[in-house]
Image (cartoon, helix red, strand yellow):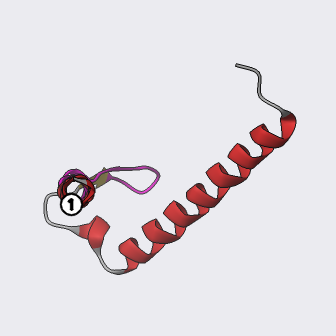
Amino acid sequence: MVSSPQQIGRWLIAAGIVIVFLGVLMILLGRLGLFRLPGDLEFGSKNWRVYIPIASCIVISIILTLVLWLINYLRR
């Protein structure tokens, strides 16, 4: 499969737009408190910090599962 430079450029632009959209979404969800749920673990001291978002990952997984299920259901 041979791709032209124009086609590769279009894919890179599309990937960049998706990354920007996901970044803005992460900022908005963080401001709503999604990444500070009970069950999100945070360890650290003065000089270091480890953050493990277990509960946030479960919530995101449930939401994505429902959205993809709905898309699949509506395509039938």
Residue visible at 60% across and 63% down in the picture: 20
Q: Residue furthest left?
A: 38
- Which residue is the site of mark 1? 70
Magenta stretch holds residue 54: yes
Residue 34 falls in image quadrant: bottom left
- What residue appears at the point 76 percent right and 38 percent down from the top-left corner? 8
- Label 1 secondary element: helix
Residue 55, percent from left and from top = 17, 57
24 or 39, nearer to the observer = 24
Q: Residue at x 19, y 67 (%)?
A: 37
Q: Residue furthest front?
A: 76
Residue occupying the far top of the picture: 1
Nearest the camera: 63 or 2?
2
Q: Which part of the image, by quadrant, shows the N terminus?
A: top right
In the picture shown, does residue 21 fall above or below 62?
below
Q: Is residue 59 left or right of residue 22?
A: left
What residue range appears in magenta?
Answer: 44-61
- Which residue type carries mark 1? Leu
Up/down of 54 relative to 36, above or below:
above
Residue 54 point in image, percent of width and height: 20, 50
Query: Residue 4 placed where, x, y %?
Result: 83, 32
Q: Identify the residue at horizontal 74%, vertical 48% (top origin).
A: 10
Question: In the rendered view, would you say 8 is above or below 35?
Answer: above
Residue 6 drawn at (x, y percent): 84, 42
- Asked where in the image residue 2 lies, by quadrant, the reply is top right
Front in this rendered view, residue 6 or 41: 6
